[in-house]
Image (spheres, rainbow, N blue to C red):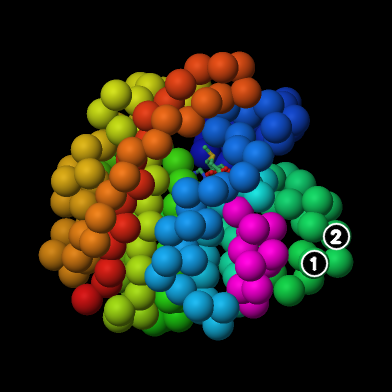
């Protein structure tokens, strides 16, 4: 069995960053949701950020304390190259979110688009939620976008778990208060539609 990291390295090795199904020219919904809850001093982590341009949008908007974490170093390398000198102000972490050591009570915003839904093992989901509880400050915000109940069953050859807003919130449980949710239809580069649900919560 190919391990997780190898799988994602080979995905990024075989396709251009604008050919992968989750590619977005602009991370508009994520950017709007973050701007709604965080000022420029906020410490923000994009978990499984891959080669997403969310970090570009956040830098453009004046955010200064940014971290991008991903399992695939090749995805982070693509963002580093795209950003050039601007990449130096961002903290880049190559690691598995279920295992990596994160600082305690550090982040004001935790953002994840299309990563949590790959955790099909409940033990991995529990480890992920424990990371959020540890590293997000009390009063911090958690924005997670996953495939909705009408979304695909697989992505990038891997099974996913699809969520209703309540189902996604239930994974995080009582320490997180659901502030709202929205649905987005993502159009893949090959013209397919994918239903995403974005949930945003505040950590007690
Ligand atoms: C579908 S892509 C989404 C990328 C990005 N969030 C976006 O919206 O463009 C999933 C990303 O999560 C990363 N990933 C998958 N499992 C991970 C894990 N356990 N820990 C950290 N990153 C992971 C992959 O390398 C990939 O970059």
Secondary structure mainly formed by the magenta segment: helix
Based on the picture, tell me whether residue 55 belongs to the magenta stretch: yes
Left-right relation of 58 to 198: right
Find numbered disc 1 in the image and state the secondary structure of the residue it sits on.
Answer: helix
Does residue 67 sit above or below 105 in this rendering? above
- SS under mark 2: helix
The numbered disc on residue 86 is 1
Quadrant the C terminus occupies: bottom left
Which residue appears at 17% of the width and 46% of the height? 166
Q: Which residues are magenta?
A: 54-64
For residue 78: magenta?
A: no
**Camera-nearest residue between 57 and 7:** 57
Residue found at the far left of this picture? 174
The numbered dot on residue 84 is 2
Image vertical order of residue 48 relative to residue 148, above or below? below
Q: Mark yes or no: residue 145 visible.
A: yes
Which is nearer the eye, 122 or 48?
A: 48
Look at 36% across and 63% down and name the residue there: 142
Q: How many marks?
A: 2
Mark 2 → mark 1, Cα distance in angstroms: 5 Å
Q: Position of residue 189 (x, y in %)?
A: 62, 23
Viewer-nearest residue: 69 or 146? 146
- Whether pointer 2 and pointer 1 mark residues with C-beta atoms closer than 8 Å, the reply is yes
In the rendered view, does 189 fall on the left or right side of 195? right
Numbered circle sitting on residue 99: none
Q: On the picture, is 161 further left or further right than 204?
A: right
List x then y, in percent, for residue 99. 45, 59
Up the image or down, 141 lies above or below 40; here it is above
The picture places residue 102, in percent across and down from the top left corner, at 48, 72
Residue neighbourhood size for the residue with mark 2, other residues' Cα within 10 Å, grouped as few (<14), some (14–19), many (≥20): few
* Residue at image point 58% right, 42% down: 5
């Amino acid at each position: 069995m190919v391990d997780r990291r190898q799988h994602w390295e080979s995905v990024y090795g075989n396709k251009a960053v604008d050919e992968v199904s989750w590619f977005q020219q602009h991370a508009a919904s994520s950017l709007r949701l973050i701007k709604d809850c965080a000022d420029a001093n906020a410490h923000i982590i994009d978990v499984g950020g891959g080669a997403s341009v969310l970090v570009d949008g956040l830098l453009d908007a004046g955010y200064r304390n940014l971290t991008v974490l991903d399992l695939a170093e090749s995805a982070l390398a693509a963002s580093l190259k795209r950003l050039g000198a601007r990449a130096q102000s961002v903290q880049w972490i190559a690691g598995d979110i279920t295992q990596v050591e994160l600082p305690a009570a550090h982040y004001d915003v935790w953002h994840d688009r299309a990563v949590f839904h790959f955790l099909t093992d409940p033990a991995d989901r529990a480890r992920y939620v424990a990371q959020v509880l540890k590293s997000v400050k009390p009063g911090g915000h958690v924005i997670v976008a996953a495939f909705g109940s009408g979304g695909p069953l697989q992505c990038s050859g891997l099974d996913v778990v699809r969520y209703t807003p309540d189902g996604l919130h239930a994974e995080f449980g009582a320490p997180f208060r659901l502030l709202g949710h929205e649905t987005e239809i993502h159009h893949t580069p090959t013209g397919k539609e994918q239903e995403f649900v974005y949930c945003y919560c505040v950590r007690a």
